[in-house]
Image (cartoon, grey):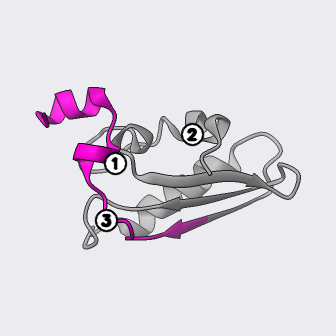
Amino acid sequence: MRDEVLLEWLHPVQDPEMFISIVDLGLIYEAAFTNEKKGADVKMTLTSPHCPVADSFVANVKNRLLEYPGIESAEVQLVFEPKWDPKTMASDEVKDRLGIW
């Protein structure tokens, strides 16, 4: 499930190496409100499973969720299935920017 409101809220969060929105990159697999919109759960991945800033990157996403009005708790789960593929998961704008066509 990908709640459009949460995706829009997460849009300003950028990949720390590519400086592109994690939403546009397709790194957010699921984003949903929980507990009557007092919580949020996100499943996301990284461009590389060996990302040296993975912990701080996930913390940035969680902190952004906690800034949403009314959200009191947030969970961010890092997953690697399915494997991230920019050819199928990134927005058309990102594919243009990365030269993927």
Q: Is 73 covered by the magenta stretch?
A: no
Residue labelled with disc 1: 15
Residue 83: % across, % down: 31, 65
Q: Which residue is mark 3?
A: 83
* Three-letter amino acid code at the position of disc 2: Leu
User: At 54% across and 62% down in the image, what residue appears?
Assistant: 43
Dot 1 alpha-carbon crowd within 10 angstroms: few under 14, some 14 to 19, many 20 or more: some
Task: Report the magenta residues as a range.
Answer: 76-101
Name the residue tied to disc 2.
Answer: 7
**Image mark for residue 65:** none
Marks 3/2: CA–CA distance: 20 Å
Question: CA separation, marks 1 and 3?
Answer: 16 Å
Based on the picture, tell me whether residue 94 belongs to the magenta stretch.
Answer: yes
Residue at 13%, 33% in the rendered image: 101
Horizontal relation, residue 19 to residue 61: left or right: left
Direction right: furthest residue: 36
Q: Tag 1 or tag 2, which sits nearer the N-term?
A: 2
The amino acid beneath tag 1 is Asp
